[in-house]
Image: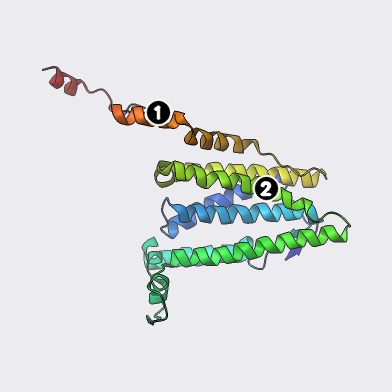
Amino acid sequence: MAIDEGRVRAGPWENCVDACNTVIEVLLFASAMNMGQDWNTVLTLFGSTLTFYVQTWDEYYTKTLTLGLVSGPVEGILTLCIVYAFTAIKGGGSYWQQSMLQTFGIAKHSFIPDYIYNLPFTEWYMVYGGIVLVSNTLQSALHVMQTRRKDSKDPIVPLYGLLPYFATWTLVPIYLYLQPIILHHHLIPFVFYIGLINAYSVGQIIVAHLTKNPEFPMYNVLTLPLALAVGDSLGPMYDIITTICDYLDIWCLTIKHPYNEKDAKKKAK
Protein backbone atom coordinates (compact mmCIF):
# COMPACT_ATOMS: atom_id res chain seq x y z
CA MET A 1 0.00 0.00 0.00
CA ALA A 2 1.47 3.38 -0.99
CA ILE A 3 0.35 6.93 -0.30
CA ASP A 4 1.93 9.71 -2.32
CA GLU A 5 3.49 12.90 -1.00
CA GLY A 6 0.33 14.89 -1.59
CA ARG A 7 -1.57 13.02 1.09
CA VAL A 8 -3.07 14.90 4.01
CA ARG A 9 -0.40 15.31 6.68
CA ALA A 10 -1.03 15.41 10.41
CA GLY A 11 2.36 16.94 11.03
CA PRO A 12 5.49 15.81 12.88
CA TRP A 13 3.85 16.22 16.29
CA GLU A 14 1.17 13.63 15.58
CA ASN A 15 3.73 11.27 14.08
CA CYS A 16 5.56 11.40 17.42
CA VAL A 17 2.27 10.80 19.23
CA ASP A 18 1.57 7.80 17.01
CA ALA A 19 5.01 6.43 17.87
CA CYS A 20 4.18 6.79 21.57
CA ASN A 21 0.80 5.13 21.02
CA THR A 22 2.62 2.19 19.48
CA VAL A 23 4.53 1.70 22.73
CA ILE A 24 1.32 1.88 24.77
CA GLU A 25 -0.20 -0.79 22.51
CA VAL A 26 2.84 -2.97 23.16
CA LEU A 27 2.14 -2.82 26.90
CA LEU A 28 -1.56 -3.52 26.39
CA PHE A 29 -0.81 -6.44 24.10
CA ALA A 30 1.81 -7.87 26.46
CA SER A 31 -0.66 -7.60 29.32
CA ALA A 32 -3.43 -9.31 27.33
CA MET A 33 -1.04 -12.12 26.33
CA ASN A 34 0.21 -12.42 29.92
CA MET A 35 3.82 -11.97 28.78
CA GLY A 36 4.84 -10.21 31.97
CA GLN A 37 8.01 -8.23 32.46
CA ASP A 38 10.28 -10.44 30.42
CA TRP A 39 12.14 -10.74 27.13
CA ASN A 40 9.02 -11.45 25.05
CA THR A 41 7.69 -8.02 25.92
CA VAL A 42 11.05 -6.51 24.93
CA LEU A 43 10.99 -8.38 21.61
CA THR A 44 7.46 -7.14 20.94
CA LEU A 45 8.65 -3.59 21.63
CA PHE A 46 11.58 -4.10 19.26
CA GLY A 47 9.33 -5.28 16.43
CA SER A 48 6.79 -2.49 16.86
CA THR A 49 9.30 0.36 17.08
CA LEU A 50 11.43 -0.99 14.23
CA THR A 51 8.39 -1.14 11.94
CA PHE A 52 7.51 2.48 12.74
CA TYR A 53 11.09 3.67 12.29
CA VAL A 54 11.65 1.81 9.02
CA GLN A 55 8.43 3.05 7.43
CA THR A 56 9.33 6.64 8.34
CA TRP A 57 12.87 6.13 7.03
CA ASP A 58 11.37 4.72 3.82
CA GLU A 59 9.14 7.77 3.42
CA TYR A 60 12.07 10.16 3.87
CA TYR A 61 13.98 8.69 0.94
CA THR A 62 11.13 7.74 -1.42
CA LYS A 63 8.68 10.60 -0.64
CA THR A 64 5.99 7.91 -0.42
CA LEU A 65 4.53 6.24 2.64
CA THR A 66 4.69 2.52 1.90
CA LEU A 67 3.05 -0.06 4.15
CA GLY A 68 4.06 -3.71 4.12
CA LEU A 69 1.88 -6.61 3.04
CA VAL A 70 1.13 -7.11 6.73
CA SER A 71 0.97 -3.55 8.08
CA GLY A 72 0.54 -2.23 11.58
CA PRO A 73 -2.38 0.15 10.88
CA VAL A 74 -4.43 -2.59 9.20
CA GLU A 75 -3.52 -6.22 9.93
CA GLY A 76 -1.73 -5.20 13.13
CA ILE A 77 -4.81 -3.50 14.58
CA LEU A 78 -7.01 -6.43 13.50
CA THR A 79 -4.64 -8.84 15.25
CA LEU A 80 -4.85 -6.77 18.44
CA CYS A 81 -8.64 -6.72 18.29
CA ILE A 82 -8.76 -10.51 17.91
CA VAL A 83 -6.34 -11.01 20.81
CA TYR A 84 -8.26 -8.64 23.08
CA ALA A 85 -11.59 -10.26 22.17
CA PHE A 86 -10.33 -13.80 22.84
CA THR A 87 -8.71 -12.69 26.08
CA ALA A 88 -12.04 -11.29 27.25
CA ILE A 89 -14.01 -14.35 26.13
CA LYS A 90 -11.59 -16.85 27.66
CA GLY A 91 -11.33 -14.90 30.88
CA GLY A 92 -7.72 -13.83 31.00
CA GLY A 93 -4.24 -13.89 29.51
CA SER A 94 -3.49 -17.36 30.88
CA TYR A 95 -5.30 -18.73 27.80
CA TRP A 96 -2.31 -17.70 25.66
CA GLN A 97 0.16 -19.57 27.88
CA GLN A 98 -1.05 -23.03 26.83
CA SER A 99 0.12 -25.14 23.91
CA MET A 100 -1.30 -23.76 20.66
CA LEU A 101 -1.16 -27.06 18.80
CA GLN A 102 -2.88 -28.92 21.62
CA THR A 103 -5.51 -26.20 21.93
CA PHE A 104 -6.29 -26.52 18.21
CA GLY A 105 -6.78 -30.28 18.69
CA ILE A 106 -3.65 -31.34 16.80
CA ALA A 107 -2.55 -34.76 17.95
CA LYS A 108 0.98 -35.34 19.23
CA HIS A 109 2.80 -37.28 16.50
CA SER A 110 6.26 -38.75 16.82
CA PHE A 111 7.69 -36.42 14.16
CA ILE A 112 6.68 -33.34 16.19
CA PRO A 113 9.33 -32.52 18.82
CA ASP A 114 8.01 -32.03 22.33
CA TYR A 115 9.43 -28.51 22.39
CA ILE A 116 7.49 -27.52 19.27
CA TYR A 117 4.28 -29.22 20.38
CA ASN A 118 4.33 -27.52 23.77
CA LEU A 119 5.04 -24.02 22.46
CA PRO A 120 2.40 -21.62 23.83
CA PHE A 121 0.57 -19.03 21.75
CA THR A 122 2.98 -16.31 22.89
CA GLU A 123 5.99 -18.11 21.41
CA TRP A 124 4.19 -18.75 18.12
CA TYR A 125 3.37 -15.06 18.01
CA MET A 126 7.11 -14.33 18.27
CA VAL A 127 7.68 -16.57 15.24
CA TYR A 128 4.85 -14.94 13.28
CA GLY A 129 5.98 -11.44 14.27
CA GLY A 130 9.58 -12.20 13.36
CA ILE A 131 8.64 -13.39 9.87
CA VAL A 132 6.47 -10.33 9.25
CA LEU A 133 9.11 -7.97 10.64
CA VAL A 134 11.91 -9.35 8.45
CA SER A 135 9.64 -9.34 5.39
CA ASN A 136 8.46 -5.75 5.84
CA THR A 137 11.95 -4.47 6.64
CA LEU A 138 13.43 -6.09 3.53
CA GLN A 139 10.54 -4.78 1.44
CA SER A 140 11.15 -1.21 2.63
CA ALA A 141 14.91 -1.49 2.11
CA LEU A 142 14.47 -2.80 -1.44
CA HIS A 143 11.92 -0.06 -2.14
CA VAL A 144 14.36 2.63 -1.01
CA MET A 145 17.25 1.18 -3.01
CA GLN A 146 15.09 0.83 -6.12
CA THR A 147 13.93 4.43 -5.86
CA ARG A 148 17.50 5.67 -5.42
CA ARG A 149 18.62 3.75 -8.50
CA LYS A 150 15.82 5.32 -10.56
CA ASP A 151 17.04 8.73 -9.43
CA SER A 152 20.63 7.78 -10.31
CA LYS A 153 21.71 8.04 -6.68
CA ASP A 154 23.74 5.75 -4.43
CA PRO A 155 21.38 3.00 -3.19
CA ILE A 156 23.63 2.04 -0.27
CA VAL A 157 23.91 5.38 1.54
CA PRO A 158 20.28 5.37 2.83
CA LEU A 159 20.95 2.09 4.64
CA TYR A 160 23.19 4.00 7.03
CA GLY A 161 20.00 5.70 8.25
CA LEU A 162 19.08 2.44 10.01
CA LEU A 163 22.22 2.59 12.18
CA PRO A 164 20.77 4.97 14.83
CA TYR A 165 17.94 2.56 15.53
CA PHE A 166 20.12 -0.54 15.71
CA ALA A 167 22.70 1.32 17.81
CA THR A 168 19.99 2.00 20.37
CA TRP A 169 18.80 -1.58 20.25
CA THR A 170 22.31 -2.87 20.72
CA LEU A 171 22.38 -1.00 24.03
CA VAL A 172 18.88 -2.05 25.15
CA PRO A 173 19.45 -5.83 25.55
CA ILE A 174 22.92 -5.25 27.02
CA TYR A 175 21.51 -2.93 29.67
CA LEU A 176 18.60 -5.23 30.52
CA TYR A 177 20.93 -8.22 30.73
CA LEU A 178 23.20 -6.34 33.11
CA GLN A 179 20.24 -5.02 35.10
CA PRO A 180 17.79 -7.94 35.53
CA ILE A 181 15.94 -5.97 38.22
CA ILE A 182 14.94 -3.44 35.56
CA LEU A 183 13.90 -6.21 33.19
CA HIS A 184 11.77 -8.17 35.64
CA HIS A 185 10.51 -5.48 38.04
CA HIS A 186 10.69 -2.05 36.39
CA LEU A 187 10.25 -2.78 32.69
CA ILE A 188 7.20 -0.55 32.15
CA PRO A 189 8.95 2.82 32.75
CA PHE A 190 11.90 1.57 30.72
CA VAL A 191 9.55 0.72 27.84
CA PHE A 192 8.19 4.28 27.92
CA TYR A 193 11.75 5.60 27.82
CA ILE A 194 12.59 3.52 24.74
CA GLY A 195 9.31 4.69 23.21
CA LEU A 196 10.36 8.32 23.69
CA ILE A 197 13.69 7.61 22.00
CA ASN A 198 11.89 6.15 18.99
CA ALA A 199 9.29 8.93 18.92
CA TYR A 200 12.01 11.57 18.91
CA SER A 201 13.87 9.81 16.08
CA VAL A 202 10.67 9.54 14.06
CA GLY A 203 9.94 13.22 14.67
CA GLN A 204 13.43 14.17 13.48
CA ILE A 205 12.99 12.16 10.28
CA ILE A 206 9.55 13.64 9.56
CA VAL A 207 10.80 17.19 10.10
CA ALA A 208 13.77 16.52 7.81
CA HIS A 209 11.37 15.09 5.22
CA LEU A 210 8.94 18.01 5.35
CA THR A 211 11.71 20.62 5.26
CA LYS A 212 13.50 18.69 2.47
CA ASN A 213 16.66 18.54 4.53
CA PRO A 214 19.24 16.52 2.53
CA GLU A 215 20.94 15.39 5.74
CA PHE A 216 19.29 12.38 7.35
CA PRO A 217 19.16 12.77 11.17
CA MET A 218 21.72 10.33 12.56
CA TYR A 219 21.91 11.51 16.17
CA ASN A 220 19.39 11.14 18.97
CA VAL A 221 20.36 12.86 22.21
CA LEU A 222 17.90 10.71 24.20
CA THR A 223 20.08 7.66 23.56
CA LEU A 224 22.95 9.21 25.53
CA PRO A 225 21.57 8.34 29.02
CA LEU A 226 21.16 4.72 27.90
CA ALA A 227 24.75 4.60 26.66
CA LEU A 228 25.96 6.08 29.95
CA ALA A 229 23.85 3.56 31.89
CA VAL A 230 25.40 0.67 29.98
CA GLY A 231 28.88 2.07 30.58
CA ASP A 232 28.14 2.48 34.27
CA SER A 233 26.76 -1.06 34.51
CA LEU A 234 29.91 -2.43 32.88
CA GLY A 235 32.24 -0.29 34.99
CA PRO A 236 33.62 -0.78 38.52
CA MET A 237 31.37 1.86 40.10
CA TYR A 238 28.29 -0.35 39.85
CA ASP A 239 30.10 -3.28 41.45
CA ILE A 240 31.41 -1.10 44.28
CA ILE A 241 27.99 0.38 45.09
CA THR A 242 26.10 -2.92 44.93
CA THR A 243 28.73 -4.74 47.00
CA ILE A 244 28.62 -2.11 49.76
CA CYS A 245 24.81 -1.99 49.73
CA ASP A 246 24.53 -5.79 49.91
CA TYR A 247 27.05 -5.99 52.74
CA LEU A 248 25.35 -3.27 54.81
CA ASP A 249 21.84 -4.39 53.82
CA ILE A 250 20.93 -0.91 52.60
CA TRP A 251 19.71 0.73 49.40
CA CYS A 252 21.70 3.33 47.55
CA LEU A 253 19.29 6.25 47.10
CA THR A 254 16.36 5.32 49.36
CA ILE A 255 15.94 4.13 52.94
CA LYS A 256 15.54 0.37 53.06
CA HIS A 257 14.77 0.16 56.78
CA PRO A 258 12.82 3.26 57.93
CA TYR A 259 13.32 4.37 61.51
CA ASN A 260 10.78 2.88 63.89
CA GLU A 261 10.72 4.34 67.41
CA LYS A 262 9.26 1.21 69.03
CA ASP A 263 11.86 -1.05 67.48
CA ALA A 264 14.61 1.36 68.48
CA LYS A 265 13.47 1.28 72.13
CA LYS A 266 13.37 -2.52 72.09
CA LYS A 267 16.91 -2.67 70.75
CA ALA A 268 18.03 -0.14 73.40
CA LYS A 269 16.68 -2.33 76.19
Packing grade of label 1 (10 A; few <14, some 14-19, many >=20) is few
The residue at the far right in this view is 152
> On the image, which quarter does residue 98 sit in?
bottom left
Amino acid type for the residue under numbered disc 2: Leu
Residue drawn at point x = 45 percent, y = 42 percent: 178
One can see residue 23 in this view: yes
> On the image, which quarter does residue 5 sit in?
bottom right
> On the image, which quarter does residue 247 sit in?
top left
The picture places residue 233, in percent across and down from the top left corner, at 48, 36
Q: Quadrant of the C terminus?
A: top left
Q: How is the image coloured?
A: rainbow
User: Foreground: 56 or 220?
Assistant: 220
User: Foreground: 50 or 263?
Assistant: 50
Going by the image, does 46 lie left or right of 267?
Answer: right
Amino acid type for the residue under numbered disc 1: Ile
The picture places residue 161, in percent across and down from the top left corner, at 72, 48
The residue at the far front in this view is 236
What is the total number of numbered labels drawn onto the structure image? Answer: 2
Residue 163 got which mark?
A: 2
Residue designated by label 1: 241
Which element is circle 1 on?
helix
The picture places residue 220, in percent across and down from the top left corner, at 66, 39
The picture places residue 250, in percent across and down from the top left corner, at 31, 28
Residue drawn at point x = 48 percent, y = 57 percent: 29
Going by the image, does 120 lie left or right of 204?
Answer: left
Packing grade of label 2 (10 A; few <14, some 14-19, many >=20) is few
